[in-house]
Image (cartoon, rainbow, N blue to C red):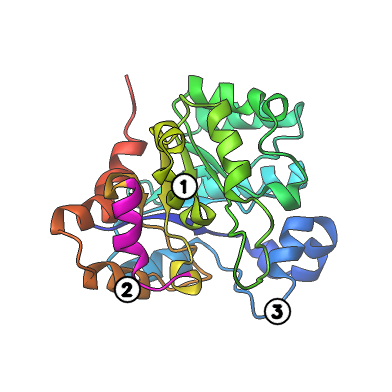
Amino acid sequence: MIFDFHTHIFPNEIAQNREKFCAIDSTFKELYSNPKSKILGVEELIKSMDINQINKSVVMGIGWEDSKLAQFSNDYILESIDRFPERLVGFCSINPKDHINSPKEIERCVMKGMRGIGELHPDYQKFNIGDKKTMAPIMEIALANNLITTTHSSEPVGHKYSGKGMTFPEKLWEFILNFPANPIVCAHWGGGLPFYSLMPEVEKSLKNVYFDTAASPLLYSDKIFETGSSLVSSKHILLGSDWPLLNPQKLIIELNDSNLKKSQKNEILFENALSLISPKS
């Protein structure tokens, strides 16, 4: 079994009106102003999943700054998970700085079957993820409803790219410390946060934290699977592609070619994901 924990889908209206939505939303502009950036829908995702023998995928928003666009995106995700309930798990897009609309939107999405929040994109949504007052309203709802929260993460060194931002490990750790009971997924290997798990106080704080592998081949060598597993345990790593940015095939090959044990590979491929999304009593 294979479970891709990080994909993005868009309704046709957005795909066909790139410039219009770039003018409306700062996150969308940062990520998709380049005409070569792929904007695809659920049919293309399901086709890709079939080709790559992926059983399930999390479909999520991009961290829309505009709350109305977030709701529009959520409507499409809800429609998609209703069409493909055995294949897709939905995460809702909200902007944490919108304390009026975001809590209501989370509750609406939860009632219709979504299992998480994300992807948050602090820099382009213009909020401070390390500020407890900003994050508390949504994290309290998330905890009460057993929701997973996925946030973008940024590497403090290395090459620049669209959407990289500055959500560095220091900011992520502040977020994690503020909400230790919440399950949190730091995308893109947490911008290198696993390295700091060698510090005892950081290791202790990562009990409910997971790291997805989104866009990994664009960021790290294939050694990251073994190195990451040695730092935070394969039990805390989730296979995520960032489709359609990346074809999942290369990621799956890198993992399968690694020297990890089969049991560790299975944890990353699907076991951790299934455990996370399973309803908690």
Q: Which residue is labeled 3 in the image?
A: 35
Circle 1: is it few (<14), some (14-19), or many (20+) Cα within 10 Å?
A: some
Q: Amino acid at mark 3?
A: Pro
Q: Is residue 134 magenta?
A: no
Q: Residue furthest front?
A: 199
How many labels were placed on the picture? 3
Residue 142 location, x and y as percent?
A: 53, 27
Which mark is on residue 51?
2
CA distance separating discs 3 and 1 = 37 Å
- Left or right of 254? Residue 71 is right
Of labels 2 and 1, earlier in sequence is: 2
Residue 239 numbered mark, or none? none
Mark 2 to mark 3: distance in Å?
25 Å
Q: Nearer the viewer, residue 64 or 79?
A: 64
What amino acid is labelled 1 in the image?
Tyr
Chief SS of the magenta region:
helix
Residue topped by disc 1: 196
Percent coordinates x, y for residue 76 in the rendering: 58, 50
**Residue drawn at (43%, 41%) of the image:** 199
Q: Quadrant of the N terminus?
A: bottom left
Ranked by sequence position, the earlier of labels 3 and 1 is 3
> Within 10 Å of the Cα at label 2, are there few (<14), some (14-19), or many (20+) other Cα atoms?
few
User: Circle 3 — which element?
Assistant: loop
Q: What span is colored magenta in the figure?
A: 220-232
